Image (cartoon, rainbow, N blue to C red):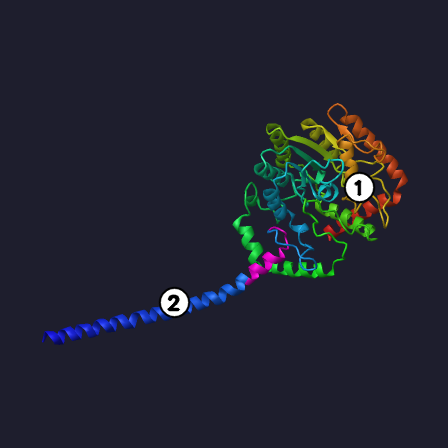
C-alpha cells in the first residue's frame, strides 16, 4: 500500500514540475523577441542621429560630403552653445543677440591670439535668456575673465518672450541633460534634420569649412549673393511685426543689472556695446513713435555702466542700401569686418580703418550731448536719403493695414 502511495505521489510531483515552467518559458521567449524587434529600429534611429549629429552636440566625427554641413545648427544655438560651454569652458565670452553672433569674431586680431574667446550670442534673446547663459558660463568656468556684451534695444521689450528653443533646465549643468540627449537621439524630427544634413553636405561647395560655428561665431556665409535689398525689406518688416508696441520690461532691466553685479562679484571684466544696426533700423524706431523711449533706454544704461555706442547715424550705419553692400547683411546685421572695427575701437586698437565718427563711449556726463548729436546726424540723413525714409514708412503703413484688416 505504501508503495502505491509513493508512486502516486511521485507521479503528481513530476506532473507539476513539467506543466508550469513550460508556459513561463514560452511567454518569456515571446517577450524577448518582442523587445528585440522593438529595440532594433529604436537603436538604429539613435545610432543614425548620433553619427550624423545635425545639431553638433555629440561631437561625432565629421565626414566630408556626409555630415559636415550642419544646416540646422544655427537655429538650435540655445542647445549646442549650452553644450559647448560645458565642453570648452572658455575663459572669455562674447554675448548678445544674432547681431553679435554673426558679427563679432572670437578669432579677431583685435582680441589677440592668446585669448580664449567663445561667441555665446544667440538668436533673438531677451535679457533673461542672456543672463541665464552668462550664469551657465560662470558655472562651468569659475575663472571667467572677460565678457564682451552686445546690447540691443529690442532685448528689453516686455513683449519679447523666451524663444521656444530656450530650456532653463539645461543651464548651469555640467553635462548634457537627459531630455536633450533622448530627444536628439530618438526624435523623428531629428531624423529629418539628419537627412537634411546629409543632403546639404552632398550639395555644398568644396570651399565650405567643416568647422563653422565651432567657436560660436556664425556669420552669414551668403550675404554677398545679390539679395541684400530683399533681406533689408524683410528685416524692416520683421521689426515692425515684433516691436511696434515696444514697452520696457522692468524684469529685463533687473536681469541686465544682475549681469553687471555678477561680473563685479566675480571680478569679471565687462565691456558693453550697442550694436551698429543700419540707419533704417533707427528710423523704424522713430516711425513707431518710440524714439523718446530709445533715448531713455540709453540714459538708463549709463546709470548702470559706461557703454560703447556704435548706433546712430555715422559713416558705417548710413551706407546706402544696394544689391551688394560692404557693411550689412540686412538692416539689423552687420558684417564681421564691421565687428572687427567695433573690437578695435573698444580695445583701443586704433587704426586708420576706423571712421572717426564710429563709436563713442557714453556715460552720465556726456549722454545728453551725445543724444543731441545723434538727432542732428539724423536730420542730415533724412535730407540725403529720402528714398530710404520712404521705404521705412511704406512698410510701417503696410504692417498697420494688415493688422487692421
Q: Residue 181, can we see it?
A: yes
Does the magenta-highlighted stretch encompass residue 56? yes
In the image, residue 258 sits, relative to residue 197, either above or below, namely above
Q: Quadrant of the N terminus?
A: bottom left
Q: Name the residue that disc number 1 marks.
A: 337
Mark sitting on residue 28: 2
In the image, residue 36 sits, relative to residue 69, either above or below, namely below
> Percent from the top left, x then y, of residue 96?
69, 40
* Image mark count: 2
Does the magenta-highlighted stretch encompass residue 33? no
Q: Main secondary structure of the magenta part?
A: helix
> Percent from the top left, x then y, of residue 358?
82, 34
**Marks 1 and 2, the one that precedes in the sequence:** 2
Q: Nearer the viewer, residue 107 or 290?
A: 107
Q: Nearer the viewer, residue 218 or 11?
A: 11
* Residue numbers of the magenta segment: 44-57
Quarter holding residue 2: bottom left
Side of 45 relative to 309 (left or right): left
Local crowd size for mark 1, using a 10 Å CA cut-off: few (<14), some (14–19), many (≥20): some
Q: Nearer the viewer, residue 98 or 237?
A: 98
Which residue ends up furthest to the left in the rendered image?
A: 1
Helix, strand or loop status at disc 2: helix
Which residue ends up furthest to the right in the rendered image?
A: 384
> Percent from the top left, x then y, of residue 236?
77, 47
Q: Residue 276, can we see it?
A: no
Q: Residue at x 64, y 50 (%)?
A: 76
Amino acid at each position: 500500500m505504501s508503495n502505491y502511495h509513493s508512486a502516486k505521489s511521485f507521479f503528481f510531483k513530476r506532473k507539476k514540475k513539467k506543466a508550469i515552467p513550460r508556459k513561463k518559458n514560452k511567454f518569456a521567449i515571446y517577450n524577448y523577441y518582442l523587445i528585440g524587434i522593438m529595440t532594433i529600429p529604436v537603436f538604429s534611429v539613435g545610432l543614425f542621429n548620433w553619427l550624423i549629429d545635425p545639431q553638433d552636440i555629440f561631437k561625432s566625427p565629421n565626414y566630408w560630403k556626409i555630415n559636415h554641413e550642419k544646416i540646422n545648427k544655427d537655429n538650435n544655438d540655445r542647445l549646442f552653445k549650452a553644450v559647448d560651454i560645458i565642453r570648452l569652458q572658455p575663459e572669455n565670452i562674447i554675448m548678445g543677440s544674432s547681431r553679435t553672433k554673426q558679427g563679432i569674431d572670437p578669432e579677431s586680431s583685435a582680441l589677440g591670439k592668446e585669448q580664449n574667446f567663445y561667441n555665446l550670442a544667440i538668436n533673438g534673446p531677451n535679457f533673461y535668456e542672456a543672463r541665464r547663459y552668462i550664469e551657465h558660463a560662470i558655472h562651468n568656468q569659475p575663472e571667467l575673465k572677460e565678457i564682451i556684451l552686445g546690447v540691443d534695444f529690442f532685448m528689453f521689450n516686455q513683449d519679447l518672450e523666451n524663444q521656444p528653443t530656450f530650456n532653463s533646465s539645461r543651464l548651469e549643468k555640467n553635462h548634457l541633460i537627459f531630455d536633450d540627449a533622448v530627444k536628439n537621439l530618438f526624435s523623428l524630427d531629428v531624423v529629418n534634420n539628419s537627412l537634411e544634413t546629409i543632403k546639404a553636405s552632398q550639395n555644398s561647395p568644396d570651399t565650405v569649412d567643416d568647422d563653422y560655428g565651432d567657436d560660436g561665431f556664425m556669420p552669414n556665409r551668403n550675404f554677398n549673393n545679390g539679395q541684400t535689398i530683399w533681406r533689408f525689406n524683410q528685416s524692416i518688416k520683421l521689426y515692425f511685426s515684433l516691436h511696434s508696441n515696444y514697452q520696457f520690461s522692468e524684469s529685463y532691466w533687473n536681469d541686465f543689472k544682475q549681469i553687471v553685479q555678477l561680473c563685479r562679484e566675480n571680478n569679471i571684466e565687462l565691456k558693453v556695446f550697442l550694436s551698429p544696426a543700419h540707419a533704417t533700423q533707427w528710423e523704424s524706431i522713430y516711425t513707431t513713435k518710440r524714439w523718446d523711449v530709445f533715448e531713455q533706454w540709453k540714459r538708463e544704461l549709463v546709470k548702470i555702466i559706461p557703454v560703447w555706442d556704435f548706433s546712430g547715424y555715422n559713416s558705417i550705419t548710413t551706407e546706402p542700401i544696394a544689391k551688394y553692400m560692404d557693411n550689412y547683411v540686412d538692416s539689423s546685421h552687420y558684417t564681421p569686418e564691421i565687428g572687427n572695427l567695433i573690437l578695435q575701437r573698444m580695445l583701443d586698437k586704433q587704426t586708420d580703418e576706423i571712421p572717426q565718427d564710429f563709436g563713442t563711449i557714453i556715460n552720465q556726463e556726456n549722454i545728453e550731448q551725445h543724444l543731441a548729436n545723434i538727432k542732428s546726424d539724423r536730420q542730415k540723413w533724412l535730407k540725403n536719403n529720402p528714398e530710404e525714409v520712404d521705404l521705412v514708412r511704406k512698410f510701417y503703413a503696410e504692417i498697420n493695414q494688415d493688422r487692421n484688416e
